[in-house]
Image: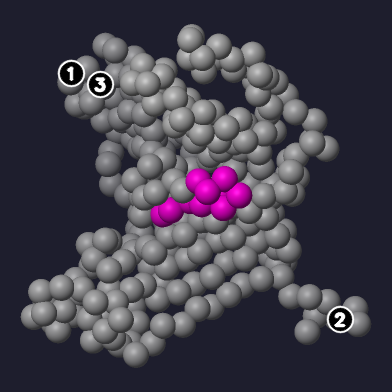
Amino acid sequence: MSGLALPVGDAWTTGTEEEVSFIPECFCPACHGGKAITRMLPTKVPLFRELIIMALECEECNFRNSEITFGGEIQEKGVKFSLKVTSALDLNRQLVKSDSATLLIPSLELEIPPGTQKGTISTIEGMLNRAADNLEELQPERLRLGDVDNFHRCRHVISELRKMSGRRVSEETDEDEGDGAKLEAEDDSELKDFLIILDDPAGNSFVENPHSPNADPGLKREFYFRSATQDMSLGLQPSAEAVKAGTIDDTNPSHKNVASGATKSSHSIEIEVAKKEKGGRHE
């Protein structure tokens, strides 16, 4: 399929190989040539929404890159997922991180900000390994610059990320040769529980609930109205009062544009969690 038209309305379905679009002679950000090919696949994630999966591959330098974008619009409310990972099954959950989402692992004090791992569709395990790979890539450079303290901090975080993803790192690391740690498979019984938080003010991120349509005991989902500053970060306009003032004050309700998803006086949070059972019935 070579056409570039996107589905409309209910025409969005789970994408198939026959629905892939090809765009030849694209610019390559690595070699700056014009021989890259982009493949696009519009698809719909069950219990979520429409996505466009894009992959670029350069014939000249073999550079590859993939990301996703959204076929829909910015949602009326932001969304925040909190997942307690307790087993290898949780590591296989599908995760969608949009350009505007922040991912947090509080136990490591690790934050993956918006724009990093942007437009990503992966599993929890894949996300953890990618974060570790990104940190590990710059370890030789940290040593070259003499940033030894940061090198050791990053090595600790990398090791913990590998453990969280079901891998452990051997201690056979020579500081003079960089971070050449070896990966080994880890027994599922050795996995430690940890919390992962995905916060997206645009409301376009997602963590899979394998128990659907039932509630997920390990997953909490919160919907919230964005602040005026968050609206601005997404390209949404502030109120006329904010424009007149020439600044954004999140404590001033009049700076919130009511067209961006909330009344000037409201800021509520809706929380979805598994309901506790009492007397054999749901309350």
Residue 56 appears at what percent x and percent y? 33, 28
Q: Determine which quarter of the picture holds residue 184.
A: top right
Disc 2 + disc 3, Cβ < 8 Å: no
In the displayed structure image, the side of residue 145 where residue 108 appears, left or right: right
Foreground: disc 1 or disc 2 = 2
Name the image quarter holding the C terminus: bottom right
Q: In the rendered structure, which amino acid carries the disc numbered 2?
A: Lys
Q: Decide: few, some or many residues near mark 1? Use Cα within 10 Å; few <14, some 14-19, many ≥20.
A: some
Residue topped by disc 1: 33
Residue 120 appears at what percent x and percent y? 44, 42
Residue 71 is marked as: none
Residue name at image x 29 percent, y 24 percent: 37
Q: In the rendered structure, which amino acid carries the disc numbered 1?
A: Gly
Per the image, label 3 sits on a secondary structure element best described as loop
In the displayed structure image, the side of residue 248 where residue 223 appears, left or right: right
Distance, label 2 to label 3, CA atoms, is 59 Å
Per the image, label 2 sits on a secondary structure element best described as strand
User: Is 45 inside the magenta-drawn segment?
Assistant: no
Q: Is residue 270 above or below residue 14?
A: below
Residue 258 appears at what percent x and percent y? 27, 83
Residue 55 appears at what percent x and percent y? 37, 31
Q: Nearer the viewer, residue 259 or 219?
A: 219
Residue name at image x 48 percent, y 14 percent: 178
Residue 30 is marked as: 3
Residue topped by disc 2: 278
Disc 3 + disc 1, Cβ < 8 Å: no
Q: Determine which quarter of the picture holds residue 247.
A: bottom left
Which residues are the magenta region?
101-110
Q: Is residue 47 above or below residue 166?
A: below
